[in-house]
Image: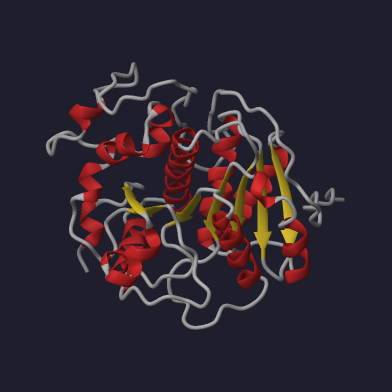
Amino acid sequence: MTAPRPRARRPRAAFVEEEGSDATAVVPADSGVPARAVVPGSTITSATATSSAGPTVAALGEPNVPSPLPAEDAAIFGLTLDGLALRWVRATDSAPIGAEAMTGADRRAQAMGVSSGWLMENAGCAVAAAVKALAVQTERWGKGPILVLCGPGNNGGDGFVAARYLSRQGARVVAVLVGTEGRPLGKDAMRNWDRLEAEEGVERIHTPVSRDVAILAQGVEKAGVIVDALLGTGVRGPLREPIRSAVELIERARRAGIPILSVDTPTAVDLTGGDLSDPVVRAHVTVTFHRPKTGLLTRRGSAVAGQVLVAPIGIPQGADRG
């Protein structure tokens, strides 16, 4: 008989200050994606610092030097936000696209042999590097848990991957599945949620109703950084519970001075036209993927996205052609 899968616990006040430390991050062999490089903790602070992993960040910013993918890049966890922007300058300087074009590129990449799990691995790794950079920049690294609020879809899956990488950097992480169902929806998100069970530095929580989110919010001002991995694009109008309460928790934390980082787009800004949900997350940093998004370049979108980083995730150039 198959042993029952461990369940995430229901919430309690999860925020107790705890010192963190750097650790080595390695993608395990059972990840379902190709073997990755070791990602050591680092104290690099200069955007032009050299790394034993390869060329200088400045060199990688040159148009003719390809950017390594995040999960293969041993240096990104020692870079500042500006250093990451320079590292990924080729993606940043590419032509903007909307949500539909991004979905098409994602699907064509998979048809060309790039696994969806590998795309998620790179996205989550990039998010984790940006979270650490934001926490260090705001002097909050090691000062409290990183709260990763994840919806049930692929946006949440990116958050689960980020939680794993952050834990292996020495952070204490609280990964929260915000949704009525007890399991994520997609196979990649589900696998990465399950993998967090083995991470000693990660506490998994499920909040199926708004009351659970309210309990989780107790002491949220002690969080180091909050990661918004709730919803991607395609949401219009008022948000439903428990996502709505999670967005309100993020707004409360922002008012308390907690840095907010959004995954792909702030919940929920349309990546094509920049339309905002009600309520909407106002991020200090947004990490979007593959190419800039037109919705984040609009007046409304840019007003809530904060500093936008564009990370490569392994979509081939040919996948952009419809």
Count of numbered badges drawn on the protein? 0
- Residue 220 horizontal/vertical position (percent): 68, 51
Res. 159 visible in picture = yes
- Residue 234 horizontal/vertical position (percent): 44, 76
**Residue sticking out furthest to the right:** 1
Out of 4 and 143, give the one closest to the viewer.
143
**Residue sticking out furthest to the front:** 256
Out of 238 and 315, give the one closest to the viewer.
238
Out of 19 and 258, give the one closest to the viewer.
258
Q: Answer with the quarter of the image where residue 42 lies.
A: top left
**Residue sticking out furthest to the bottom:** 237
For image coordinates 44% across by 20% down, the residue present is 43
Q: Is residue 82 left or right of residue 197?
A: left
For image coordinates 36% across by 52% down, the residue present is 113
Q: Relative to 30, does residue 38 appear above or below in the rendering?
A: above
- Residue 236 horizontal/vertical position (percent): 46, 81
Q: Is residue 218 left or right of residue 266?
A: right
For image coordinates 25% across by 24% down, the residue present is 48
Q: Is residue 163 left or right of residue 205?
A: left
- Residue 150 horizontal/vertical position (percent): 59, 58
Q: Is residue 147 left or right of residue 158?
A: right
Q: Relative to 252, does residue 164 appear above or below in the rendering?
A: above
Q: Relative to 33, does residue 184 appear above or below in the rendering?
A: below
Q: Relative to 184, does residue 275 appear above or below in the rendering?
A: below
The colour mode here is secondary structure
Res. 185 visible in picture = no
Q: Quadrant of the C terminus?
A: bottom left
**Residue sticking out furthest to the left:** 64
Out of 246 and 188, give the one closest to the viewer.
246
